[in-house]
Amino acid sequence: MGLFRSSAPLAVRGTANDDPVRVAPSGKPASLWQDGFGSLAIRSLQIILVVAVATGLIFGLRQLTVVVIPLLLALILACAFAPVMAWLRRKGVPPLGATLMVLLTIVAIFAGIGWLIVAAVRGQWEELAAKAQQGFDQLMSWVSTLPFSIDQAQIDEWIDSATDFLTSAQFGSGAIAGVSAVASFVTGFILLVVVLFFFLKDGPQMWAFTLRPFEGEKYARAVRIGSKTVSVFGSYVRGTASVAAVDALGILIGLLILQVPLALPLAVLVFLLAFIPFVGATLAGILAALVALVANGWVVALLVVGVVVLVNQLEGNFLQPVLMGRSMKLHAFVVLIALTAGTVLGGIVGAVLAVPLTATAWGIIQVWDGPSTPARWARRKHRTDERALVAGHGPVTVEPAS
């Protein structure tokens, strides 16, 4: 029999045994990829390819951390100081002069933070070491009062084990690894300064060159992505730095009132750790409480914990909503997942970069189809539809207005 001409996607042709055979409109047998299971297989292959490419990309970036991390940090810092560069250029300052002024300011800030920590620790190290020894002696006296016995021979054995580790080849290899890490840090810092110089001086021209292959709507989308990236990175750094400065100042005042040693370096550490959401504040509080416990006793340590909790509550409920803005508002679950992934992939630096990168990705999605139009899949549904979903009645079809 001949083929049936029909607008339907498939036709039926008889055989010698009168068994129907599904054929395509062109007369060829229908492909196995056209049914539901075939569509599932195609989608699975696409997902596997995306995961493989993402895995290869992440692996390659991890092998080039000495280049990638300074590049990202330079980009974030350049976005943070972009308003300053624009203001200097409007005032008639030449690009090279404006770049050198901003770059030297950034380097001076980092150098000043390092000098504050080192100078304060050196000035109070002997006092803290003496009090630490006193606290250790008190701990040993308390151990002797425990219901179970720990004799001096066991304590001496533990001390000897620690001494043997410090003099072992394993500790020496760790020290060599530490020297290598310091060398990598110096290399990365130099690269950061050089890349930051070019980003500050020629950033707009470099971005304009990158946009040359795009035309029409793709060009407009790329421009929106660039503007949103600069805005989110800059807002994150400026807002977090402001919140961290207020936190550090509040904890510094509390530590000075309680006469806790190393108050200044502890406040600087609070400032630095504030760039790691959730975890940073907890680590800073634990470290401050430990120093107070060693130097001033458990009562002052509890008061330090109270000061840290009070400052963090004020920061979370009042400062962050005002200084960070709605553009940086991410759900706590998203922040937690981003921090975990960043820490696993990049350690401490990964934890610092995870949240701004996630916020930037979300910001790009928000302007994907227009200045105020998110990507189609990320758009908010009608309020009636949302209420029905929350109530557990399933999605409600909302017809668009004509």
Image: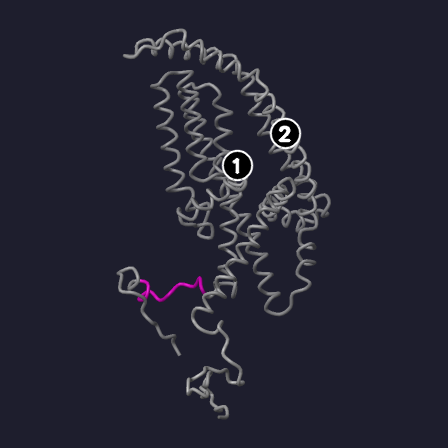
Magenta-drawn stretch, dominant element (helix, strand or loop): helix
Image label count? 2
The single residue placed furthest to the bottom in the displayed view is: 1
Relative to 375, is 199 on the left or the right?
A: right
Q: What residue type is labelled 2?
A: Val
Q: Residue 210 carries which label?
A: none
Q: What stretch is highlighted in magenta?
A: 377-386
Q: What residue type is labelled 1?
A: Ile
Residue at point 59%, 43% (across, down): 62
Q: Is residue 306 depicted above or below 21 in this figure?
A: above
Relative to 129, is 311 on the left or the right?
A: left
State the image coordinates of residue 20 (x, y, percent, origin top left).
42, 84
Q: In which quarter of the image is the C terminus?
A: bottom left
The single residue placed furthest to the front in the displayed view is: 17
Q: Please tell me which residue lies in front, 188 or 288.
A: 188
Dot 2: element: helix
Magenta-drawn stretch contains 393: no
Residue at point 67%, 49% (across, down): 89
State the image coordinates of residue 375 (x, y, percent, origin top left).
48, 64
Q: Please tell me which residue lies in front, 96 or 379.
A: 379
Q: Residue 348 carries which label?
A: 1
User: Circle 2 is placed at which residue position?
Assistant: 182
Residue at point 44%, 64% (across, down): 377
State the image coordinates of residue 175 (x, y, percent, origin top left).
60, 23
State the image coordinates of residue 220 (x, y, percent, origin top left).
59, 65
CA–CA distance in space, label 1 to label 2: 15 Å
Q: Is residue 216 depicted above or below 7 in this figure?
A: above
